[in-house]
Image (tube, rainbow, N blue to C red):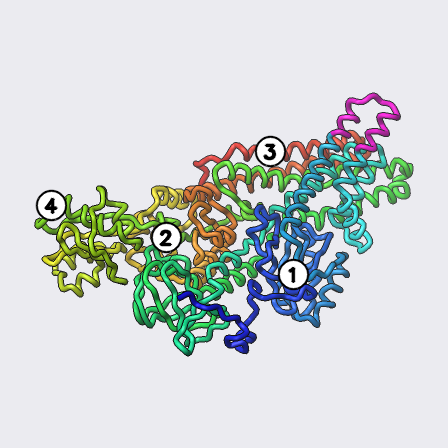
């Protein structure tokens, strides 16, 4: 009989109201600042698939703000600094692409938060809910199209300047075209620059604004247009490359069903909201269903796939007294279990909390150019003003000559080449990686990978295939022909949907024979009649219960079990006929990947929830010496934190249970083909074909990118320095200033594009 559905309000309403909010199921008043996590909205960076990224999740009393002028890490850093003095802030979540900030703070502190942000020069708009994801994606596309359009228009201005006749009409036309390009690309820059100047903050936007206006005023309008277009496009690229919300929360929440089938006092069963189920309640889960809560089995037997939680390679047989976890999948048999933890304290809930904690501990890397510009930009600005004002008074220069020199200085000192050097180099590296099936989510991770000292690898699905296979078979009786015995085993196994039986059936050849009176013994195996023979295909425990085990058989089974294999035995009433061993096998590329990492001077560690013997066997096969076994997700996170004390640590994983460690690692590598959605979101780098050799390749590319990046910085500053000195002594003209700026820009662009050729496999230590 189909169970009836009972509303939350009629089942332990008081208990439910005391539980922390689960925003995926609450109905919020649109006048409040609560955000429904089920809403499809980007919450960080540029979201390639907005619908897959949840809205900002904020707690009770959370404040959601739209900050129009916040679109890059520089503004984020300024806002974080401004909010340091505001008490009560529990968490900040920035969405630079949508210009959203969610602040987890008590309602009484909302006003101090907005006041502090406004005092930093940013206007705020309080929202009750984030804009739809489609609107955010459309706004990002529109901005990119506008910037590309500005660049095209700037190229047009350059063409008019160089190829059009020297007439006033063409000059005015060129200036108009340049003004359009500057307007398209630079209005936001001008606003930020003006705001910075009014606050006495000589940042890169302020210098950029003055340099562009100065260049335009002295007749270098093509340069002004091109510099502004390139600068704004570079800003957009850099903002899209910073840390995105690798928000695994949505995928984690999806693992835990919102409803559970709970036994009522009158013995009936009803679907109840999982958050309302109290500890001690009895819940039933059918084959194929996910568990909504943690508990202990009180009735039934079944095979439960715990890979999403523990990372175990094979389903685990469960019977009375065994623990089971929310988010796992009951693959066979109906189970009844007593709830041992509320929905807010399940293993899955603790994984979610661990992901949030790990992400909260990782601050965005400050951009190299902005760090340098904090000193460079104000210094150049002050020097230019000193030349314009002090030259006539101290050196007797004519005022127009002094102003001209100052404007030349500003054009020469324009940070265009510096600004472009980072994104061009990084984007080239990202493109080179993409060609090799490596998707890197931001330039910060491309730069960080070179520093990795240790790579921790999950076992199941990462080092191994993640799919059980038949690895050994042995016919143990001469009572029947060996071919017939194997065909019988195939026939029984083919009738079962248990993963171990599926592996046996897949590994054996031949057409299945007809099976009569087929049945399954939960937690034991299957049985049936074939050609008049009553047969069982069962596990070690069932053979012992049938008293068909022997010393010789125990030795054979032990040989396989110490290697982490699952043993299945075919037997009839007279005795054991055959033995089959199922195991997860290593990927063919894993050993090569480990060897390449060692050649790069990077240590490797295996982290797994499997037993030590299985882990050690797999590790020996691929050349890993450091093995950590029997680990839960929190244990993996603790290992990453411990290893990080000796230097940056990378993590490679594919499952939900790897998400906390992926988030805590300096660089998290996820497997895109076989990995879970949550692992992909939590990862900083996605390996599209799951080939572990892409991990050392990423490190090599990172090291080469870092070298090219510093070459570009040296080129940009070196060329600027030469022409800077010439300008101060009156030896630089405006065309030389333009050459210095554009020349440096082209050099760093071409040098950065060299990365598109890829990276040599022989590059090792650096």
Find residue 471 and report its horizontal and vertical position in percent. Answer: 25, 47
For the residues marked 3 and 4, what is the alpha-carbon distance in whole angstroms?
70 Å
Q: Residues within 10 Å of mark 2 (few under 14, many from 20)?
A: many
Q: Residue at x 85, y 27 (%)?
A: 171
Please name the residue that numbered disc 4 is placed on. Answer: 481
Q: Secondary structure at mark 2?
A: helix
Of the image marks 1 and 2, the number of the one nearer the N terminus:
1
Badge 3 vs badge 2, beta-carbon distance below 8 Å = no
Find residue 119 and report its horizontal and vertical position in percent. Answer: 77, 61
Answer whether residue 38 is magenta in the image.
no
Of the image marks 3 and 1, the number of the one nearer the N terminus:
1
Q: Is residue 428 left or right of residue 100?
A: left
For the residues marked 1 and 2, what is the alpha-carbon distance in whole angstroms?
36 Å
Q: Residues within 10 Å of mark 4 (few under 14, many from 20)?
A: few
Of the image marks 1 and 4, the number of the one nearer the N terminus:
1
Please name the residue that numbered disc 2 is placed on. Answer: 460
SS assignment for the magenta stretch, majority: helix
């Amino acid at each position: 009989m189909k169970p009836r559905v009972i509303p939350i309000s009629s089942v332990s309403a008081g208990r439910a109201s005391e539980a922390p909010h689960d925003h995926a199921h609450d109905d919020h008043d649109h006048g409040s600042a609560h955000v429904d996590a089920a809403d499809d909205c980007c919450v960080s960076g540029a979201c390639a698939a907005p619908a897959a990224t949840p809205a900002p999740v904020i707690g009770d009393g959370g404040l959601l703000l739209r900050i129009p002028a916040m679109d890059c890490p520089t503004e984020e850093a300024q806002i974080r600094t401004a909010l340091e003095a505001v008490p009560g802030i529990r968490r900040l979540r920035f969405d630079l692409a949508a210009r959203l900030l969610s602040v987890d703070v008590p309602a009484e502190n909302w006003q101090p938060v907005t006041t502090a942000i406004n005092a930093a020069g940013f206007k705020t708009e309080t929202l009750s809910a984030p804009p739809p994801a489609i609107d955010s994606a459309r706004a990002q596309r529109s901005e990119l199209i506008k910037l590309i359009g500005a660049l095209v228009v700037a190229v047009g201005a350059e063409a008019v300047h160089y190829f059009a006749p020297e007439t006033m009409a063409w000059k005015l036309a060129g200036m108009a075209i340049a003004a359009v390009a500057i307007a398209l690309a630079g209005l936001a820059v001008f606003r930020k620059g003006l705001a910075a100047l009014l606050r006495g903050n000589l940042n890169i936007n302020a210098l950029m604004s003055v340099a562009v206006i100065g260049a335009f005023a002295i007749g270098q309008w093509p340069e002004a247009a091109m510099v502004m277009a390139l600068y704004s496009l570079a800003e957009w690229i850099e903002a899209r490359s910073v840390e995105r919300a690798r928000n695994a929360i949505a995928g984690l929440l999806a693992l835990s069903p919102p409803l559970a089938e709970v036994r009522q006092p009158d013995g009936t069963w009803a679907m109840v909201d999982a958050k309302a189920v109290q500890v001690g309640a009895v819940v039933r889960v059918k084959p194929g269903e996910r568990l909504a809560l943690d508990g202990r089995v009180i009735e039934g037997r079944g095979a439960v796939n715990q890979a999403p939680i523990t990372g175990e390679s094979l389903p685990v047989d469960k019977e009375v007294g065994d623990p089971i976890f929310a988010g796992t999948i009951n693959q066979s048999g109906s189970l009844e279990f007593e709830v041992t933890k509320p929905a807010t304290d399940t293993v899955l809930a603790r994984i979610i909390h661990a992901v949030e904690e790990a992400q909260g501990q990782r601050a965005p890397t400050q951009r190299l150019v902005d760090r340098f510009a904090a000193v460079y930009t104000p210094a150049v600005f002050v020097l230019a003003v000193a030349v314009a004002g002090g030259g006539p008074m101290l050196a007797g220069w004519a005022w127009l000559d002094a102003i001209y020199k100052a404007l030349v200085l500003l054009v020469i000192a324009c940070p265009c080449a510096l600004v472009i050097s980072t994104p061009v180099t990084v984007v080239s590296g990202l493109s080179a990686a993409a060609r090799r099936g490596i998707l890197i989510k931001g330039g910060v991770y491309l730069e960080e990978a070179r520093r990795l000292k240790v790579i921790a690898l999950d076992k199941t699905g990462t080092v191994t295939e993640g799919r059980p296979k038949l690895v050994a078979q042995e016919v143990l009786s001469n009572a029947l022909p060996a071919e017939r015995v194997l065909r019988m085993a195939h026939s029984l196994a083919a009738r079962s949907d248990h993963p171990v039986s599926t592996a046996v059936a897949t590994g054996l050849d031949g057409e299945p024979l007809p099976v009569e009176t087929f049945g399954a013994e939960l937690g034991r195996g299957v049985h049936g009649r074939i050609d008049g023979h009553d047969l069982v295909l069962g596990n070690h425990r069932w053979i012992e219960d049938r008293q068909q085990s022997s010393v010789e058989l125990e030795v054979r089974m032990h040989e396989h079990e110490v290697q982490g294999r699952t043993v299945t035995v075919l037997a009839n009433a007279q005795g054991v006929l055959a033995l089959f061993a199922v195991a997860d096998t290593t990927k063919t590329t894993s050993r090569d990947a480990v060897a390449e990492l060692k050649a790069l001077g990077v240590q490797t560690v295996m982290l797994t929830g499997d037993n030590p013997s299985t882990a050690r066997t797999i590790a020996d096969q691929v050349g890993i010496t450091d093995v950590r076994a029997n680990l839960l997700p929190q244990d993996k996170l603790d290992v990453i934190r411990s290893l990080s004390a000796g230097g940056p640590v990378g993590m490679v994983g594919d499952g939900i249970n790897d998400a906390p460690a992926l988030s805590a690692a300096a660089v998290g590598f996820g497997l895109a083909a076989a990995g879970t959605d949550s692992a992909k979101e939590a990862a900083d780098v996605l390996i599209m074909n799951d080939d572990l050799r892409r991990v050392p390749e990423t490190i090599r590319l990172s090291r080469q990118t870092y070298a090219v990046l510093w070459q570009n910085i040296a080129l940009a500053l070196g060329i600027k320095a030469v022409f800077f000195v010439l300008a101060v002594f009156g030896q630089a003209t405006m065309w030389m200033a333009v050459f210095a700026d554009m020349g440096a820009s082209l050099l760093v662009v071409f040098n950065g594009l060299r990365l598109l050729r890829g990276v040599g496999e022989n590059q090792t230590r650096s």
